[in-house]
Image: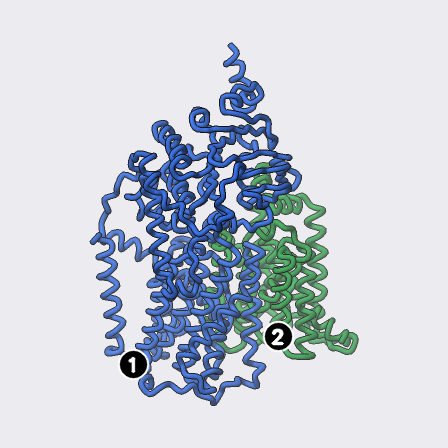
Chain colours: A green, B blue
Amino acid sequence: MLGEVVVGLAIGSAYSLLAVAVVLIYSSTRVLSLAIGEVGAFSLYGALWAHTHGIAGWRPSVLVAGLLAVLGGGALGLLVERVVMRRLVGRPALDGLVATLAVALFLALLELAMYGIDPFAAPSPVGHGNVDVLGSTLTAPQLALLALAGGVALGLWLFLTRTRFGLATRATTSDPTVARLLGVKVNRVYVFAWGVGGLLAGAAAALLAPVQGSLTPFSLTTALLSALAGAVIGGLDSLGGAILGSLAVGVVTGVVGSRVDPTTSAGVVFLAVLATLLVRPQGFFGSARATA
Amino acid sequence: MRRPEATRLVAGGALLLLVLVAPAFLSLPQTSIVTTALCIGIVALGLDVLVGATGQLSIAHAAFYGVGCFTALGLGTHGVPWPLAFAGAAVMTAAVAVVVGLPSLRIRGLQVAIASLAFQLFAQQVPNKWDGIKFVGETFERPGWLEDETSFYYLAVGCVLLVLAVLARLRRTWPGRSLVAVRDVEARAAAFGVSTGRTKLLAYGISGAIAGLGGALFALQQTSVSDTQPFILRESLILVAIVVVGGARSPVGILAAALLTKALPGLLGTDFDVPGLGPASQVVPAMLAGLLLLAVVMQPQGIGGVLRDLERAASGRRERPVPRPQPTDAVVAAARARALRDVPRPLVQRLPTPSLLVARAVSVRYGGVIALQDLDLEVRRSEIVGLIGANGAGKSTFFNAVSGLAPTTGTIRYRGTDLLGLPASGRSARGVARTFQDMGLVRGDTVRENVLLAQTWLASYPAVGGLLALGGALGTERELRRRADQALELFGLQHLADERLGDLPYGTMRIAEIASAVASGPDLLLLDEASAGLTPEEAHALGDRFRALRDELGLTLMVIEHHVPLVARTCDWCYCLESGVLIAAGTPAEVTAQPRVVESFLGRGSLEEVAT
């Protein structure tokens, strides 16, 4: 049981990376991003392709490919912000959601057209060691996910509370207009949110795909949905809440998924989202503003 | 006949003809491909009820399609005749969709879409639990006359036409008008008697029923289903793309987008390569996604918007009437409109009473801000009561308290009943109608549709009856329309009934809003800055109209006014607010003579001017 919880936490860590990306983007731009999972996946596809086929005679190792996926995710996040999202500032919230849905669909279908429907082999970028924890075996990528999620949570907390730019980000989150009047370059905050979101998505993709065994179009979007479920339960505008929520979704998926079956665990997550939205629509740690 | 209607008829006729003769040009497998695409088209039309009419997004419609499909299969393989299986699938899917839509009762935000995503993830796994798929090998027998693909194609076309007919009815019934009101003016829809919660769930129900019908049609076409690919997340995303690219609220555009996405690759054949890009089956969906991006960024109206532009270009410029109210004799017009008072209100709510509205210790707080504090006031029957005060004094807040749109403490008794215990949408039935300072109506709808919207509480037929044109719905709608025309005539707006409200000058829109409020058959009419946007002559005429409404229609009026001469000329009694507190009450002459009122309302400088 405890071992399953730990494995669930590892999967939840991948969700939490995606959830942090979603919350960063949502808090600064009020856009609920469905795109960020596929941003990571698209970048990983490219990196893995380079790993197997080589670009201009250079074949990056798996680890370098993983790092490339992270950087590529960041770059793609910036591109999406610049080309699509910036044109939608001030438009209704639904337009933002549909636009990110369009980006996800576009990237996934592009993956399908470029790399085919067959699962793409995703080797672990961090080696193949195993560790036994409380009766369950944790693979190296799962361990890396746990460590990375912890590091990211700590790093972001330090950044948001201890740096000037972090303060500007928090100001923009609470009121973009006032932040602008106070001299915060709001656009930079948006760029930052999408850039960091893309980096996190690239990292989540690079580590989650080996855990799932392979990479397929929409697989990261499916993971993103679990992250979104967790973020809604924890609170869409609360970093800590979203991390806890997505860890919880990971644990439910791990425990119920292996004890009963994946259908039941998805059903439990759906009911949890439904119940949260009915009882406490802003999520457990969210502020009421998030529901408007 | 006006030219746009003619253009539309010709275009629609040509399209229908094309659809009817299409099988003659297609092979049987190709016909079957088009039929499947029509099933998806039906689901997309269902999704549009949420996206276009209500402004909600569901990313679970492929799952709803599956719910309809497997329900129909389950019923059909157990010997239920196919029409009943179809109906069962529609009802089942509607119920599921309502459950998924429940969070919309609590929140307006995008989180509702997340609930639909979570449902999608759950539902698409359910068939895996059924040891492969439960219905593999079982078949949903088609009746003899539906066995060949061509006749089945016509059944699919028939289903599409049925859905289009229901959607057309929707716009002419209270459910449809309520959907639009909730989308455009959600916070105010309750003041028109629209129950926002019920309306949203209704939208999910209608949307789900249509999606379920599409699924049932697919089930009968396939006769057995072994592949869950049509029901997975990817397809839900594609359905959203179809609706957005097709154009929200544009059924023709949506069907076109569905056919392009779902039928075109199949019609081109699996071995067809788009030059330089790859197989059509992969390129076409990717192009749809690209179009979706373009649509969201550049042309939010989609194919439907392009079609509307073409239609406008084809029919040329229409001659527009001068969009101003026609001058009418207020007294005569009001006398002619007395039938508007005939509304089914219980006798106890019609009895003469000296005090119609009594407010005691009414306070409204928003967080730390006190918008209204311990207000006591009274509105006697058949009076015109003015409410004056500077901006931010709490006048509109008081109206919001009365109509249930503000968090209020204290008591507001209307005919002895405390309004604060009633839902906001129940007040128009009681006889309280209002207008908003910055317009509460739906600008995209016609003037008449808005007047009909305000009469929602009088539309007593059930929603399903309205959509299927059963059970006296048509008669009730005719009666409401007659009332609407009467109310428009009362304000000299009869010639503007079919104009889009948003195309009218501001002052005329405001008059249309008063007409809407009067059409709901109120006893108490709350008018928020009715004279804003009017010319001085029109403002003067408005005063006569207030009196006519009271004398001929027997209404009681409470008016928020900045136009002091209008207050002085028409009001019997007057209250003045300052910073949420009542500072004066009396006849207009008494109130406007008080130095504190002059100072508060007109500013300190004016007082000195008056003094010198």
Residue A91 visible, this orientation:
no
A26 to B145, vertically: above or below:
above
| Along the viewing direction, whichever of A176 and A80 lies nearer the viewer | A176
Q: Secondary structure at mark 1?
A: helix
Q: Out of A195 and B566, give the one closest to the viewer.
A: B566
Which amino acid, mark 1?
A: Thr
* Chain assignment, label 1: B
Q: Position of residue A286 (x, y in %)?
A: 66, 54
Element under label 2? helix
Q: Does the residue at mark 1 contact the one at mark 2 (Cβ under 8 Å)? A: no
Q: Quadrant of residue B80?
A: bottom left
Q: In which chain is the residue bearing label 2?
A: A
x, y percentage for residue B346?
48, 51
Residue type at numbered disc 2 = Gln
Instruction: State the CA–CA distance, disc 1 to disc 2.
Output: 45 Å
Residue B233 position in % (x across, y down): 51, 70
Q: Quadrant of residue B213?
A: bottom left
Q: Quadrant of the N terminus of chain B?
A: bottom left
Identify the residue under disc 1. Answer: B150
- Front of the two marks 1 and 2: 1
Pinpoint residue B446: horizontal percent, then vertical percent: 35, 49
**Quick one: label 2, few (<14), some, or many (20+) residues within 10 Å?**
few
* Left or right, residue A36 beside residue A20: left
Identify which residue is drawn at 56% across, 62% down. Answer: B102
